[in-house]
Amino acid sequence: MSEKTRIIRTFLKNKAAVVGAVISIVIIIVAIFAPWIAPYDPLTQDVYYRLKPPDTGHLLGTDFYGRDILSRIIWCSRISLIVGTISVALAMVLGTALGILAGYLGGALESLVMRLADIMMSFPDEVFGIMMLVALGSGLTKVIIVIALLFTPRFARVAYAPTLALKERDFVSAAVAVGASKKRIIWQHIMPNVLGDVLVMGSLWIGTAIRLEANLSFLGLGVAPPTPTWGNMVREGVDYLMSAPWVATFSGLAILITILGFNMLGDGIRDMVDPKLRL
Amino acid sequence: MLGYVIRRILLAIPTALGVLTVIFIVMRIAPGDPAEVILGEYASQEAVEALRKELGLDQPLWKQYVDFVGGLFKGDLGKSPINGQSVSLLVARSLPYSLELSLAGIGLGVLFGLPMGILAAVRRNSFFDYASRVFSLLGLSFPTFYLGVLLLLLFGIKLNLFPVVGGGDLSNIADNLYHLFLPALTMGLIMMAYVSRMARSSILNVLNEDYVKTARAKGLRERAVLYKHVLKNALIPIVSIVGVYSVVLIGGTIMVELVFSRPGMGKMMIGAMKQRDYITIQSLMVIYAGLVIIVNLLTDLTYGFIDPRIKYD
């Protein structure tokens, strides 16, 4: 059996991972086809149909402005996925590069990167997010940048530790001895060996990024209303928890299912790649 | 041990200064003059200038930085330009609500999460293990505010068992605990999920070690193997994860305070954000980061305490 077949079989045997993959794929499809799937326009208000409980016309009910909750939830999946994937991808590229360079080159760069990582990690995620978004102002791009900045030191640390170990390995010493350039050693010898850990970590962090975006938009930061996000929908729903609990509960459920799906998928990918679990 | 403690405290100082510098710089890259933002676009030039002077914004940047750090050392966080009150006083009023919530959450998480993780690892692949894994996966995926909303809806609104708003009277223990219960449960359930998951995996890792096999092979009772060999060695990663997730929890209090309308620092921060009160926001950032630095310090000191190898490094 080839290595690839073995890895795929390990993944398929893990039921939680398969369920996670299915949930993630369904959410991605919903996000892509949102304009065709959503029964109503997510921004159209209908004052005669405010805070209506779920019925056949509006499957998940309506909010304070009479907007269809199901349609809003469907559209929100786009924002959550965009933020989750792009911020993690940016942090992965930047963090891995910094971690490898700090580990391999050492010296002042190493001290600078590692101290900066210490400083950034002295803020709880939401506190750092609030600070940056208060300074930069809100908007989709800014949320992505802030979450990417927040995750960069974590990827740097994940890439840094194995780089230090790889630097001492014989195949790297041999490459140095035959005169390979630093650039070549990093690209050919260090990077491929670090990438596995980094990619696994990336898959595990998408759920965290989605949750952080939801937290920030719940706090009133990030993508500004009327553009719906799951976080700001729950926030609006909290005000009507007694009279219209469906507004907050359904929007929150969408976040929960999405994060759950990505976490299960991430766990599955980690189990599949982690050699310790192959025993 | 004392040498290790001193060394570790000294190491925290540059990080703390770095954190203050980052907060200072970020709060000053905010677009627009804070004085203009606070007073609004119709304010007269004189009023803006007066406020700039009051906030110290007319000083050169280095002087502002020195004043900012110097003030912190004296315990002076400045005055809120919005309501003129001392920020230190406002923080002193709200900090206990946030602290008790964080501590209760961490306490509940460790108290229940640790035994749950240990039991799940020892009875691997049992129904209990399966249920505890589902629980931790759910806990890891629940946004804190959503869990808070659901608990509030069920226990506060539907069953009417607990108050839905406020933090209670701090001097009245019963009233305080009554108000603390649901928010602490929200934080505690999430912390339990993190702690039990990590405890389970660290114990499983240790159970595979050779010295555990040796202990069993020499006929040691399972209980002795678990307490003398497994738990002691699994403790380091567990302490580390309790430290890491205590930081996550401190961030989570902001959302929970908002859901339950608790008068803590998170609620204060949201209020300051709405009013664009930069001085208060900046001060709260310092307090939150300070709490994280203290948690990290305590985590490291605990390592030294439970693993004698670390303090000699």
Image (cartoon, coloured by chain):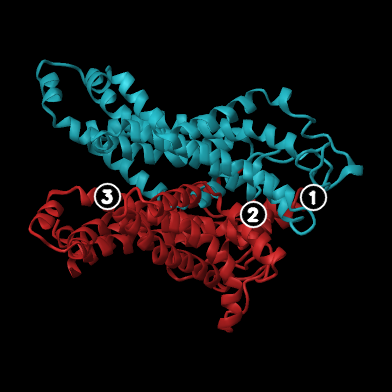
Query: What element does badge 2 sit on?
Result: helix
Chain letter, cyan in picture: A
Secondary structure at badge 3 equals: helix
Is there CB contact under 8 Å for labels 3 and 1? no
Q: Quadrant location of the C terminus of chain A? A: top left
Residue A184 placement (x, y as % from top left): 24, 17
What amino acid type should be assigned to the residue bearing mark 1? Tyr
Query: Which residue in the structure is indicated by mark 1?
Result: B42
> What is the letter of the red chain?
B
The image quadrant that residue A161 belongs to is top left
Disc nearer the start of the sequence (2/3):
3
* Tag 2: amino acid: Met
Q: Which mark is residue B273?
A: 2
Q: Is residue A261 visible?
A: yes
- In the drawing, what numbered circle is on residue B204? 3
Report the front residue among A112 and B175. Answer: B175
Give how far apart the Cα atoms at labels 2 and 3 are: 45 Å
